[in-house]
Image (spheres, rainbow, N blue to C red):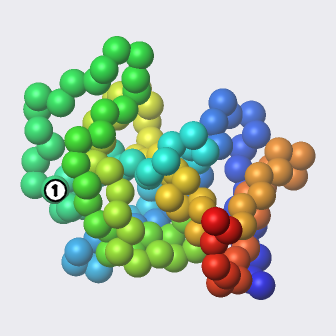
Amino acid sequence: MQRTITPFDTTRPHIHVRFYVIDLKGSHHSLDGILDTGAPRSEFSDKFLSFAGFIKNPPADISMKSGLQTQKYGKVILPSVEIFGRKISDFEVFASRFEKEWGIDALIGLDFIRRFEVTISYRHAAIVTECLPSFAPIE
């Protein structure tokens, strides 16, 4: 089983990670995101999605619900993403409006994490991912 180790800064209030997306033209983009184990689906900022050509123009009338820092409003399929050294093709994510002060491009949610064995070690400041063997889900 191949293991990858991704370091992160334990002094930050969230687990910030750098990852990569290949756009429709084959260009590679490096992004900053937050690992969000409470989010069922990954969200990418509409600002990044527009910049990379996945959406034309983000709607101007998207507003955030009180108390939230993101507002999901659409879905996009990314041709290829690499997160924690793991590549996934045709990864469906939510297009979201992010608070401008956030300074990130994405939230990586459980839809990504569930594909792997993921260990978060604050003591070692590392995220360890391993491929899971194929097996039937427990019912």
Residue found 82% across the figure and 45% down from its top: 122
Q: x%, y% of residue 26?
A: 29, 80
Which of the two residues, 90 or 134, is positioned nearer the viewer here? 134
Q: Is residue 114 left or right of residue 100?
A: right
Residue located at (58% from left, 74% from top): 86
**Residue 40, percent from left and from top:** 49, 48
Residue furthest to the top in view is 66
Instruction: Indicate the quadrant where residue 99 lies.
Output: top left
Q: Is residue 128 left or right of residue 53?
A: right
- Binning the other alpha carbons within 10 Å of mark 1 as few (below 14), some (14 to 19) or many (20 upward) gives some
Residue 126 vertical position relative to residue 132 in the rendered view, above or below: above
Residue 21's quadrant in the figure?
bottom left
**In this picture, is 59 found above or below 17?**
above
Residue 30: image x %, image y %? 44, 61
State the image quarter where residue 70 is shown. Answer: top left
- Label 1 sits on residue: 55
Left or right: 40 as drawn, with respect to 26: right
Q: Amino acid at mark 1?
A: Ile
On the question of residue 10 being in view, the answer is yes
Q: Residue at x 20, y 61 (%)?
A: 54
Vertical relation: 1 (above or below) 55: below
Compare residues 46 and 11 and report the one nearer the observer: 46
The local secondary structure at tag 1 comes to loop
Res 16 visible: no
Q: Residue at x 82, y 51 (%)?
A: 121
Q: Quadrant of the C terminus?
A: bottom right
